Image: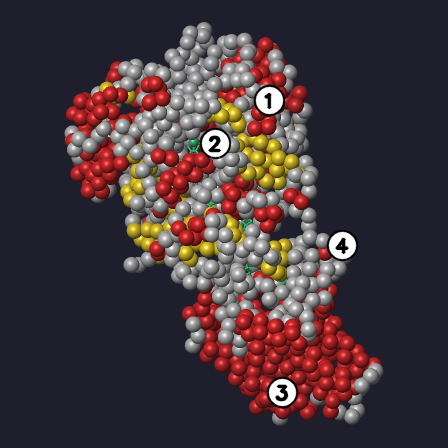
Amino acid sequence: MKRREFLKLSAASVGALMLAPEGQALKLPNPLARAPRAWYEGEVSTVLTYCENCFWKCGVRASVADGRVWKVDGYEANPKSRGRLCPRGQGAVAQTYDPDRLKRPLIRVEGTARGDGKYREASWDEALSVIASGMLAIKERYGSESMAFFAHGSGDTWFGDYLPAAWATPNVGKPSVSLCTGPRETAAQWTFGRGIGGHEPIDWENTDYMVLIGHHIGEDTHNTQLQDFSLALKRGAKLVVVDPRFSVAASKADRWMPIRPGTDTALLLAWLHVLITEELYDKAYVERYTIGIDKLTEHVQPYTPEWAAPITDLDPDAIRAVARELAAHAPRAVLPPGRHTVWYGNDTQRMRAVYLINALLGNYGVEGGFYLAQPPYIEKYPHPAFPLEPASGGCSGASGAAAETIETGYRDAVDHGTFFAKTTAVQELIPAMITGEPYRIAGLVAYGVNLFHSIPDVERTKEALKKLDLYVAIDVLPMDHVMWADVILPEATYLERYDDLVEIAHKTPFIELRQPAVAPMWDTKPGWWIARELGHKLGLQEYFDWPDIETYLDKRLASIGSSLEQAKKVGTLVQRGRPYLTDWEQRNLDPFGTPSGKIELYSQTFADAGFDPMPTFEPPEEGPVGSYRLLYGRTPVHTFAKTQNNWVLMEMHGDNAVWIHPAEAKAQGLANGDYVWLENQDGVRDGPVAVFATERLRRDCVYLVHGFGHRAPDMKVANGRGASDTALMSRYRLDPISGGAGLRVNFVKLVPGAPRPRLPRLTRLAERSV
Amino acid sequence: MARYAMAIDLSACVGCAACAVACKLENEVPPGVSRLWIRLEESGTFPDLSLQYRPEQCMQCADPPCVPVCPTGASHINEDGIVLVDAETCIACGACIAACPYGARYFDERGFVGKCTFCEHRLAEGRVPACVETCPTLCRSFGDLDDPDSDVSRAIRAAQRVDVLKPEQGTHPKLVYLNAPARFGLGREGMAR
Amino acid sequence: MTSTTVTTFYGAVNNGAFWHWPTLLHFCLVALAGGVALLVAYRALTSERFGWRLPALSVALIALDMIVLWAESLARWRLTHVYLFLSIRPASAIWWGAWGLAGSAVLGLLLAFGWGPRRLWGALLVVTSTMALLYPGLALAANSARPLWTPLLLAFMPVTGLLLAWGLALLFRQRDLRPAVGVLALASGLLGGLYLVGLATGDLAAREGLHHLWSEGGPWFVAALAAMVLAPTLLRRYPAAAALLVVAGAVLARTLLVEIGAYMPPLL
Ligand SMILES: Nc1nc2c(c(=O)[nH]1)N[C@H]1C(S)=C(S)[C@@H](COP(=O)(O)OP(=O)(O)OC[C@H]3O[C@@H](n4cnc5c(=O)[nH]c(N)nc54)[C@H](O)[C@@H]3O)O[C@H]1N2
Ligand SMILES: Nc1nc2c(c(=O)[nH]1)N[C@H]1C(S)=C(S)[C@@H](COP(=O)(O)OP(=O)(O)OC[C@H]3O[C@@H](n4cnc5c(=O)[nH]c(N)nc54)[C@H](O)[C@@H]3O)O[C@H]1N2
Ligand code: SF4
Ligand code: SF4
Ligand code: SF4
Ligand code: SF4
Ligand code: SF4
Ligand SMILES: [Mo]
């Protein structure tokens, strides 16, 4: 007889004996014992806005009680969240109530150097006046182009587009281009004549066969993409994952191909070879929509699976099998582009290869492949024409080949000519700060860009910052790089502010409203307010004639027969799109914006510019003996290097560890949990970081989750936890076509004997939450 | 009068912890303790590997050892079969924490024991639990076991395999795991049918 | 296949100790209180010359135990402990313990003041003090998911409890308890041995538990058992030493079982 059953029996008998059932205790009115009142027991109001904990922009419903946001959820009507949020979106609330937030404007103490981190509080008026006079002095001395703007996040519409355009500088960089999507956008532009855009237009609902090249969906938790991916698997779609690491996606795959890092183009060429030589491709589609198949046929002859096998360290039969399965499922078979595509410096060509395969499968603009994403229609605020429009690109901005720079009478961006694409590469603006070539960048405004965690060669960045006349940081946290600025402006968090409308190119194009759920805490201000006030101090009133953001937004919304009042109620305004080629043909519109008006398997433009018109494989250079290629990626619960001070998210995942194959760890006498330093090919060290010996990784590389290793004493939670992959990237390889900075060209050794860091307990730090 | 239950499809779960974060905030769970956490298990040798992400939380046992041991009746089963703690009669003696085979309960420093409530406050409004609502892989289903058309009933019927944790404890969990990767299977018997 | 399994977590796992040192102390004090109360009952029923000191002492011990419990309780200021007495929870060991101690306290007072029918009070006190002695074993044995808390504790805890109390009593010239203490000591050692054998021959969980017990303080546990087994041989010539041995043994054994015994095998 089970012990509990025995106890129950005795209970029953005694209960009976006492002539009373096992009953509830009778309750006394006992004020001391009151259960704490839950937030949802009171008056709860909800506000529709969209999330800012990454750049995916999911629609959220914020629940407010007693003037505080307690919880955010997705809402059904929003095509980004569909009623669900990812872990980071769920946890975003804790950012607003982070006691370490920037609370008031700060001015670097006179007489201290950048990096000393000594600041005094200032009024907004003083802070903005200091910035304005600094900028005007630079304009006076070097011209307006000598001010650079780095911007990322919703507010980059103000500090990456609106203000720089009004001010007249082409030197505007967004990390989401040359450190992220640059190669795939440029490749798409010159293959399909249109970029990919911020929301990858994969027709997940209809695909039957998916091949992920890297692209670690599941750890990459872009919400809707993860939902679609998961639903596709539920529907029974087949999955192949090509990744040197057994990623979460790989664990769900029908086939995992643990490829040698940096050799993907060889694999892709072999797939092209099989598709073409075995005549498995969609002849009708290729005939009708593409040019250059004959040249491509000739080009891929040598690239047999047997040729690719030793290069990629993959089984030739497996390579051949996947190509045939792709063809068997076409056109409902797709190779998504991935998002972070700056890997090895020849990435535009790799992305071209990915697209050529998709084209041969006949899936571009066809159900189960790529749909054609349309931006929603809405007009800009009617301001006087800007002196110039910086080609800052970005997920939401123009793609790889922004319109030929119209004659503006202003000097080109300082990176112009260092690579082919017209978009600006944020990291290529930095040398001009040091060398003054081709002309000097003397001032920098960094809005929501993590200078020391997002841009490789941190030492160079620091050297550049030291040389500037003016460095302004607009941020929410005292990040490492923020505490270098001359003036620090504390922005209100997303739950506390309006922003410009976001226009999402999508199957069903839509517009989302960002509106405040609560008033800004402390002396923080929204980006639009900062841009407007600064604009006025810079004498740019004509562009900032709108008295407040409500007027601005209402005016724009009027252009589509809506209003701010309506938008506040519905949160998202959905329009109709033209997702498939058939939709375009019915209206006899030309879907392809390439020079030839077709999908270019062979790119004359590239040939003319001196690049391979068709992808070729170029082996990645090897690292010093005893070192491992440094790979990196995401953890589901963090966004880059911006959420490591969020106690809820840190409770889920509190630091990173260096992944290494157990055999390699053993060979160096290292065990799980040992602490090591990481030292790269140039002797740069970071850490200490714990060793995570795992079978999930090839033996020729190590892996770090990006975003940890903050050295920011004022970020009490994040400071000193884990190691920074960026710190170890003293090198990057410039993609001559897209301007992307290939980041997977660094190599590290594990140096034993590092001390286990002594850090305050997370629980204690969490309890400080305001 | 329902018999609420939850099912988590482990073949779809990616261990992203959105559910765990949602739970923390929805229910103001204090730092350092959890109603819901994620176990990540990897098994095998390169390249023959297998991963399992398993969210763990109160199993809402049909036969919960945490209830009879309670000396005040604070730990009880409500009319919908949800195991709850009444903070106002709890003396924080810890007997229920000792009795729970799944580590699902914790001391709340405010003087009582906390645990998963199946978000009963949301059920009252006709919403599903916070962890179910937000899951980006849609691998969680919830509903009334007595209703054959409820999400959870349908999910369980459709599943290749159904597992419960520690069936030998005879707790008859109303949280079940569906389609666990073969290498991590647990044995089907013992769920609350 | 040489398959390694690596386990990691997202989020805090609730694996903190739930019964801290005051609980360990309580499990000894409650034994003391119960054991002394039982002795009071025994005297009340048997001896002619019955003073107020012993019952007063038993009440004092109960009070001390309550103070320890109260001091460690998270619900210290919430006055929720009244609910122990406002519901009928016969399946709850703690509920029995509460009534046992409360009853023993009341009866102890009545006897100390010499109010009412002594023999009747004594008879009732036998019941209540036994409840108090039994409850720790019940409280532990109820947790079937914790392999070190086996049903055998239903016997081991009360016996060692009584041993602890009466062993201590020996030091206060309660000579006539010697034979009883001798028997209790041997019984304790025997039950302790059976306990270990039970684990060793039990299911996987039991064996995992034994391994845990052993690595966390097995030798001490064995030493405690040895002390209790050896004590009787000293009872005649060195009663004080024997008393100290059994008390030390009982305290140590109980403490280890509560502290280390909380172990739960990791979920697979
Ligand atoms: N949780 C979370 N999700 C995010 C983000 C976040 O910060 N946090 N950021 C978002 C953004 S902006 C981006 S750009 C995306 C990035 O996410 P992805 O676009 O998926 O990034 P990738 O670099 O393609 O994927 C990283 C994977 O590539 C593998 N890899 C490394 N080297 C190679 C190689 O040579 N070949 C192949 N085939 N694979 C390789 C790594 O092992 C890792 O598994 O994530 C988005 N989603
Ligand atoms: N080593 C390495 N480098 C990388 C990557 C990598 O994986 N490894 N990933 C690359 C990719 S794909 C991308 S897209 C980029 C991302 O590059 P970033 O966007 O620079 O990355 P984050 O770390 O998110 O930096 C965001 C900054 O904005 C601040 N911030 C957060 N919220 C707000 C807000 O509401 N207002 C304002 N004003 N500031 C805010 C944060 O405090 C932080 O300083 O990084 C690229 N760089
Ligand atoms: S993906 Fe997650 S973090 Fe990014 S916007 Fe959506 S909910 Fe927020
Ligand atoms: S949210 Fe869904 S996918 Fe993510 S860990 Fe929880 S159950 Fe798994
Ligand atoms: S899991 Fe634990 S807390 Fe939940 S019902 Fe079962 S025994 Fe009780
Ligand atoms: S801690 Fe509270 S709920 Fe748990 S058993 Fe004790 S009184 Fe009951
Ligand atoms: S049901 Fe509610 S309380 Fe339970 S784990 Fe899910 S979110 Fe937390
Ligand atoms: Mo990115």
Q: Are marks 3 and 4 on the same chain?
A: no
Say whether marks 2 and 1 touch (CB < 8 Å).
Answer: no
Q: Quadrant of residue A748?
A: top left
Badge 4 amino acid: Pro
Look at the image and tell me in which quarter the N terminus of chain C lies: bottom left
Gap in angstroms between the C-alphas marked 2 and 1: 20 Å
| Cα gap from disc 2 to disc 3, whole angstroms | 77 Å
Q: For numbered disc 3, what is the local secondary structure?
A: helix
Which chain hosts label 3? C
Q: Earlier in the sequence, mark 2 or mark 4?
A: 4
- Do marks 2 and 4 share a subunit? yes
Name the residue type under label 2: Pro
Mark 2, residues whose alpha carbon is within 10 Å: few (<14), some, or many (≥20)? many
| Residue visible at 17% across and 38% down in the picture | A306
The spot of residue C107 in percent (x, y) is 76, 79
Q: Using the image, tell me which numbered label, if any, was put on residue A31.
A: 4
Residue A202 position, x and y percent, is 37, 31
Identify the amino acid type marked 3: Val
Of badges 1 and 4, the one in the foreground is 1
Q: Which residue is the site of mark 2?
A: A79
Look at mark 1 in the image and give the residue it sits on. A564
Instruction: Give the residue at mark 3.
Output: C181
* Residue type of the residue flagged with mark 1: Leu
Q: Earlier in the sequence, mark 1 or mark 4?
A: 4
Label 4 Cα neighbours within 10 Å, binned few <14 / some 14-19 / many ≥20: few
State the quadrant of the C terminus of chain C: bottom left
Task: Work out whether residue A261 or residue A376 is closer to the camera in this orientation and state it.
Answer: A376
Task: Give whichever of A590, C35 is nearer the camera.
Answer: A590
- State which chain disc 1 sits on: A
